[in-house]
Amino acid sequence: MLRTTNLCKIEVINTMKKLILSLFVAGLALAASAEDGHLLWLRSQPVNKAKVITKKSSPTIQIAKEELETYYNGERVTLKLDGKMPDDDGYRIDGTTITARRDVGLLYGAYALLRMQQTSALGHQPSALLESHPTYSLRLLNHWDNPNGTVERGFAGRSIFLNPDPERMKIYARANASIGINGAVLNNVNAKPEALKTESLQKAKQIADQLRPYGIKVYLSINFASPIKVGGLTTADPLNADVIRWWKDKVNEIYKMIPDFGGFLVKANSEGEPGPQDFGRTHADGANMLGKVLKPHQGIVMWRAFVYAPQSPDRANQAYLEFMPLDGQFADNVIIQIKNGPVDFQPREPYSPLFTAMKKTPMMVEFQITQEYLGAANHLVYLAPMWKEFFSFVKPASLKAMAGVANIGDDTNWCGHHFAQSNWYAFGRLAWNPDLTSEQIAEEWLAQSFDMKAAANSQLLSVMLDSREACVNYMMPLGIHHIFAGTHHYGPEPWYAPRGVRADWTPPYYHKADSIGLGFDRTMNGSANVKQYPEALCRMYNDINTCPENLLAWFHHVPWDHRMKSGRTFWDELCHKYDDGVREARHFLTVWDSMQPYVDSQRFEEVQRKLRIQARDAEWWRDACLLYFQTFSHRPIPQDMDHPVHNLDEMMKFNIPIGMYENPAQGYTK
Ligand code: GCU
């Protein structure tokens, strides 16, 4: 009896166990199929097969081992350190043996092997032997996060560093390590002085400790007036002995807490931020003082060249004018960080001429991953083609490093738009190897981010590859730039010019539309900006007949009747470009709709919603810009294209709801 009861009990317990187990498994399966984008491109399910052999152990090697043991679908992987390999973060994969000089190289090699596994179904068989070394030793994200949790030009929620949650930090660190990003500047370039207060440093230390095993160092943006604002001194003059001592003490304090601290990023004498010029000193004086203080700790200074003064007749000329006289005067641990274009992250700009002009100064490029001027988190715009365009003019080897302004926030999917994750991904991959093509990177990302049927769809790949040009077309084609609304950088307001606002913060400063034509004359007869480029480019840009048409209104005031290569007048071409952009945006939506059978429902619907906004915004851009420019051109909209469906008054009254700027998705759809 007793025995039977016990048996019964055991059976009941077993049945319950089974039930619980099956519920658990069902739960897991559900969790696995629910796709909210939170795992980014690292969505593999554990396979738990591989045995990983390694002699040395360290926190970083341990991560490499765990990643492979969990996700590698093979029997055995060997991790080997080899002191004869080049002294960098690179790795060699020979079958299933990963060799590297550094621990972090083994981690990068592990992620590369997993990436090969994930993408092999595309039909590109990975070669058995692969050796890869990074072009840049510094591959950094710049977060524009404020201490109160807001993110400047952030469209994906609040700062992930406000309360650094270990689980989130782990996904962030994994994602970065998987694409080779090895540094994070934790705070906004418009740096609050309190970033250097001891409480803030403690937080930075906490983050540094979480990121370190993944090979990621932390850096801070600093406010140049910190000696006054935090230190209570009366000056921040970089040549003043008390000021230097203050920085030394501060830097010592930082390195006590964070022994591998990377260094400082500095925005000085720009848009109202303090800098050495406030004390009669130069950028070099300021940067070198900080460089000297950081040097004993192997820290670096990234000094930004984003400078312009309100009274200048051409903002595009200014960084060159301020920095060229200082070429060769910077300390060897100072790098000048220059935005890719001479104005400000526009949908299309020529490269900043400083990159080819400065010969004796270490330089790095700053790209913007967050889409401040490219539809925020609402528009699907894959940015690799824009960055590759930059590298078609500037040799990767002429730079020391690459930085990208992050598009990351605490939204579940990190970037606000599922496809914006591809820009984070592409930035990392290009910082490792700028020779990769936009197409290779997009294919890799698609293969890892979606299931194969969607990922292998060539139309989806074309959407990504065409998206940047489409955005240029519907926002500002043919070299037009900075015609954004004054109070946000989301929609069009080419007419915005209220009295009292500085001219270079209003669109007419840039488009200069009048009865003759449209565009900024930067030729030798105008602002002479062309002269900042090498001889051959200068000649090409200076002549309206040889200037590339996609930069025509950047360099020329183009007459409305100027004959374009297509045979159309400039006005007709402009109209067609805007209309092409609208049609392309609609086409993206049509392609996406056909993906429904292959994409999980949540991501499908979220992307679909955004693509509808994008198509609508494209129409808003076309109608607002064409109807406004038409008041100058006095020419008809060509018959062979779709005509504006709104009228100008309506467009000029259109107000974006409050809240839209910080979170366009919310504001626009309400
Ligand atoms: C742009 C942007 C600002 C930012 C600045 C910079 O102007 O709109 O928010 O602070 O660039 O890069 O410093």
Image (cartoon, rainbow, N blue to C red):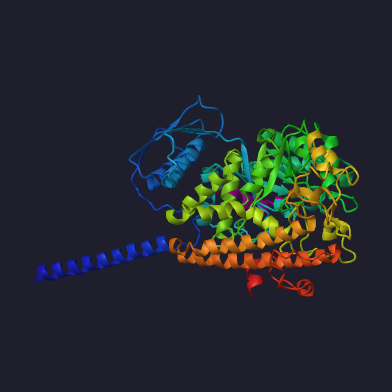
Instruction: Give the quarter of the image for residue 218.
Output: top right
646 in the magenta segment = no
Q: Locate residue 633, reporting x and y percent.
A: 84, 62
Give the total number of marks visible in the rendering: 0
Seen at 87% across and 58% down, the residue is 503
| Location of residue 302 with respect to 147 vertically, above or below | above
| Location of residue 11 with respect to 528 vertically, above or below | below
Of residues 331 and 317, the one nearer the viewer is 317
Considering the image in quadrants, where does the N terminus appear? bottom left
Seen at 61% across and 53% down, the residue is 466
Instruction: Give the quarter of the image for residue 245.
Output: top right
Quadrant location, ligand no. 1: bottom right
Seen at 90% across and 64% down, the residue is 500
Work out which residue is located at the far top of the displayed protein and give it. Answer: 84
Residue 7 lies left or right of residue 120; in this view the side is left
- Answer whether residue 353 is visible to the viewer in this image: yes
Of residues 412 and 522, the one nearer the viewer is 522
Of residues 8 and 104, the one nearer the viewer is 104
- Answer whether residue 372 is visible to the viewer in this image: no
Q: Main secondary structure of the magenta part?
A: helix
Q: Locate residue 427, reporting x and y percent.
A: 60, 46
Per the rendered image, the range of residues in magenta is 196-210
Considering the image in quadrants, where does the C terminus appear? bottom right
Q: Locate residue 587, reporting x and y percent.
A: 58, 62
Q: Locate residue 28, reporting x and y percent.
A: 37, 61
